[in-house]
Image (cartoon, helix red, strand yellow):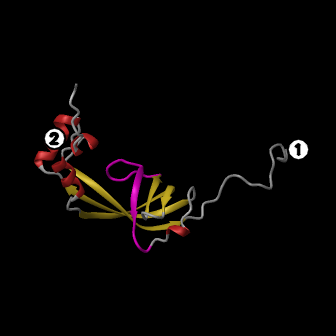
Amino acid sequence: MTKKTAKTKTDDNGLPEWADNELKNANFQELDSINRTGYFLDINSQNNKADIQLYESLPDGRTIVEEIELTDNIKTSKLMKGFVYEFKIKISNAKLSDQLRELLKTKYQIDMDEIFKFDLEGAQMMDVESDYSPSTKEGDEEEDV
Protein backbone atom coordinates (compact mmCIF):
# COMPACT_ATOMS: atom_id res chain seq x y z
CA MET A 1 0.00 0.00 0.00
CA THR A 2 1.40 3.39 -0.96
CA LYS A 3 1.01 6.40 1.21
CA LYS A 4 -0.48 9.45 -0.50
CA THR A 5 0.88 12.80 0.54
CA ALA A 6 -1.22 15.91 0.58
CA LYS A 7 -0.33 18.52 -1.99
CA THR A 8 1.20 21.64 -0.54
CA LYS A 9 0.57 25.14 -1.78
CA THR A 10 4.04 25.06 -3.34
CA ASP A 11 3.02 22.14 -5.58
CA ASP A 12 -0.14 23.90 -6.79
CA ASN A 13 1.45 27.01 -8.28
CA GLY A 14 5.09 26.03 -8.54
CA LEU A 15 6.37 28.73 -6.18
CA PRO A 16 7.24 28.36 -2.51
CA GLU A 17 4.81 30.13 -0.21
CA TRP A 18 7.36 32.81 0.76
CA ALA A 19 7.89 33.70 -2.93
CA ASP A 20 4.16 33.78 -3.61
CA ASN A 21 3.67 36.09 -0.62
CA GLU A 22 6.46 38.40 -1.78
CA LEU A 23 4.81 38.78 -5.17
CA LYS A 24 1.32 39.30 -3.74
CA ASN A 25 2.56 41.90 -1.25
CA ALA A 26 4.99 43.71 -3.54
CA ASN A 27 5.60 47.38 -2.76
CA PHE A 28 4.90 49.09 -6.10
CA GLN A 29 6.33 52.52 -6.88
CA GLU A 30 4.76 54.65 -9.62
CA LEU A 31 7.14 55.14 -12.56
CA ASP A 32 5.21 56.96 -15.23
CA SER A 33 1.90 57.61 -16.97
CA ILE A 34 1.88 57.12 -20.71
CA ASN A 35 -0.63 57.28 -23.56
CA ARG A 36 -1.03 54.42 -26.01
CA THR A 37 -3.63 53.53 -28.64
CA GLY A 38 -5.30 50.15 -28.88
CA TYR A 39 -8.52 48.31 -28.21
CA PHE A 40 -10.23 46.17 -25.60
CA LEU A 41 -9.97 42.40 -26.02
CA ASP A 42 -12.08 41.63 -22.95
CA ILE A 43 -13.82 43.64 -20.23
CA ASN A 44 -14.53 42.15 -16.80
CA SER A 45 -17.09 44.39 -15.11
CA GLN A 46 -17.25 42.28 -11.93
CA ASN A 47 -13.53 42.60 -11.15
CA ASN A 48 -13.11 46.03 -12.77
CA LYS A 49 -10.35 44.71 -15.04
CA ALA A 50 -9.78 44.40 -18.79
CA ASP A 51 -7.47 42.86 -21.36
CA ILE A 52 -6.15 45.34 -23.91
CA GLN A 53 -4.16 45.15 -27.16
CA LEU A 54 -1.85 48.09 -27.84
CA TYR A 55 -0.56 49.33 -31.19
CA GLU A 56 2.57 50.78 -29.58
CA SER A 57 4.47 48.66 -27.06
CA LEU A 58 4.94 49.49 -23.40
CA PRO A 59 8.46 50.22 -22.10
CA ASP A 60 8.93 46.51 -21.24
CA GLY A 61 8.05 45.50 -24.83
CA ARG A 62 4.59 44.04 -24.35
CA THR A 63 1.64 44.93 -26.55
CA ILE A 64 -1.02 42.90 -24.72
CA VAL A 65 -1.89 43.66 -21.10
CA GLU A 66 -4.05 41.08 -19.36
CA GLU A 67 -6.25 42.03 -16.42
CA ILE A 68 -5.24 45.68 -16.30
CA GLU A 69 -6.84 47.39 -13.30
CA LEU A 70 -9.47 50.00 -14.20
CA THR A 71 -9.57 53.06 -12.00
CA ASP A 72 -12.85 54.07 -10.37
CA ASN A 73 -13.50 56.88 -12.88
CA ILE A 74 -13.83 54.37 -15.76
CA LYS A 75 -17.33 52.98 -16.21
CA THR A 76 -17.10 49.49 -17.71
CA SER A 77 -20.66 49.72 -19.05
CA LYS A 78 -19.54 52.45 -21.49
CA LEU A 79 -16.52 50.53 -22.85
CA MET A 80 -16.74 48.61 -26.13
CA LYS A 81 -14.55 45.81 -27.43
CA GLY A 82 -12.94 46.14 -30.84
CA PHE A 83 -13.05 49.95 -31.06
CA VAL A 84 -9.89 52.06 -31.09
CA TYR A 85 -9.17 53.94 -27.86
CA GLU A 86 -6.48 56.21 -26.56
CA PHE A 87 -5.47 54.74 -23.21
CA LYS A 88 -3.82 56.55 -20.34
CA ILE A 89 -1.81 53.89 -18.48
CA LYS A 90 -0.09 54.28 -15.11
CA ILE A 91 3.03 52.11 -14.84
CA SER A 92 4.37 50.99 -11.45
CA ASN A 93 7.16 48.59 -10.60
CA ALA A 94 8.46 46.67 -7.59
CA LYS A 95 11.95 45.31 -7.07
CA LEU A 96 12.35 41.61 -6.32
CA SER A 97 14.43 40.38 -3.42
CA ASP A 98 17.78 38.74 -4.11
CA GLN A 99 16.36 35.44 -2.84
CA LEU A 100 13.39 35.54 -5.24
CA ARG A 101 15.57 36.62 -8.19
CA GLU A 102 17.87 33.66 -7.53
CA LEU A 103 14.92 31.24 -7.27
CA LEU A 104 13.47 32.44 -10.58
CA LYS A 105 16.85 32.23 -12.29
CA THR A 106 17.84 28.76 -11.07
CA LYS A 107 14.49 26.94 -10.99
CA TYR A 108 12.64 28.61 -13.89
CA GLN A 109 15.45 30.14 -16.02
CA ILE A 110 13.79 33.55 -15.69
CA ASP A 111 16.15 36.49 -15.31
CA MET A 112 14.16 39.39 -13.87
CA ASP A 113 14.87 42.09 -11.31
CA GLU A 114 11.44 43.68 -11.05
CA ILE A 115 7.75 43.19 -11.74
CA PHE A 116 5.35 45.67 -13.29
CA LYS A 117 1.79 46.70 -12.53
CA PHE A 118 -0.43 48.59 -14.96
CA ASP A 119 -3.52 50.67 -14.15
CA LEU A 120 -5.84 52.07 -16.78
CA GLU A 121 -6.52 55.68 -15.76
CA GLY A 122 -8.42 56.72 -18.86
CA ALA A 123 -9.88 55.38 -22.09
CA GLN A 124 -11.05 57.79 -24.77
CA MET A 125 -12.69 56.28 -27.88
CA MET A 126 -11.05 57.61 -31.00
CA ASP A 127 -12.90 58.58 -34.17
CA VAL A 128 -11.16 56.35 -36.70
CA GLU A 129 -12.49 56.22 -40.24
CA SER A 130 -12.63 52.95 -42.09
CA ASP A 131 -11.53 52.40 -45.70
CA TYR A 132 -14.76 50.51 -46.26
CA SER A 133 -17.65 52.50 -47.66
CA PRO A 134 -20.98 50.65 -47.60
CA SER A 135 -22.32 52.77 -50.50
CA THR A 136 -19.79 51.42 -53.02
CA LYS A 137 -19.88 47.82 -54.12
CA GLU A 138 -17.13 45.84 -55.77
CA GLY A 139 -17.19 46.37 -59.51
CA ASP A 140 -19.12 49.69 -59.27
CA GLU A 141 -15.97 51.78 -59.69
CA GLU A 142 -16.13 54.26 -62.51
CA GLU A 143 -13.72 53.74 -65.36
CA ASP A 144 -11.87 56.62 -66.98
CA VAL A 145 -12.86 57.05 -70.65
Q: Is residue 27 left or right of residue 50?
A: left
Q: Eyeballing the image, is 111 above or below 74?
A: above
Q: Nearer the viewer, mark 1 or mark 2?
A: 2
At 46% across and 55% down in the image, what residue appears?
A: 52
At 23% across and 62% down in the image, what residue appears?
A: 28
Q: Using a 10 Å C-alpha cutoff, classify the residue at mark 1 as few (fewer than 14 neighbours), some (14 to 19) or many (20 or more).
A: few
Q: Position of residue 127 (x, y in %)?
A: 60, 64
Q: Using a 10 Å C-alpha cutoff, classify the residue at mark 2 as few (fewer than 14 neighbours), some (14 to 19) or many (20 or more).
A: some
At 43% across and 52% down in the image, what residue appears?
A: 56
Q: Position of residue 100 (x, y in %)?
A: 15, 46
Q: Quadrant of residue 33?
A: bottom left
State the residue position of label 2. Answer: 103
Q: Is residue 139 left or right of residue 47?
A: right
Please state, as top left, top right, bottom left or bottom right, where the N terminus lies in the image.
top left
Q: Eyeballing the image, is 32 above or below 12?
A: below
Magenta part of the chain = 55-73
Q: Is residue 81 left or right of residue 68?
A: right
Q: Eyeballing the image, is 15 above or below 128?
A: above
Q: Position of residue 55 (x, y in %)?
A: 47, 52
Label 1 secondary element: loop
> Residues under labels 1 and 2: Cα distance?
74 Å
Q: Eyeballing the image, is 5 above or below 78?
A: above
**Which dot marks residue 145?**
1
Please state, as top left, top right, bottom left or bottom right, where the C terminus lies in the image.
top right
In the image, 86 versus 95, the foreground residue is 95
Q: Position of residue 72 (x, y in %)?
A: 41, 73
In the image, 109 versus 1, the foreground residue is 1
Marks 1 and 2 in Cβ contact (< 8 Å): no
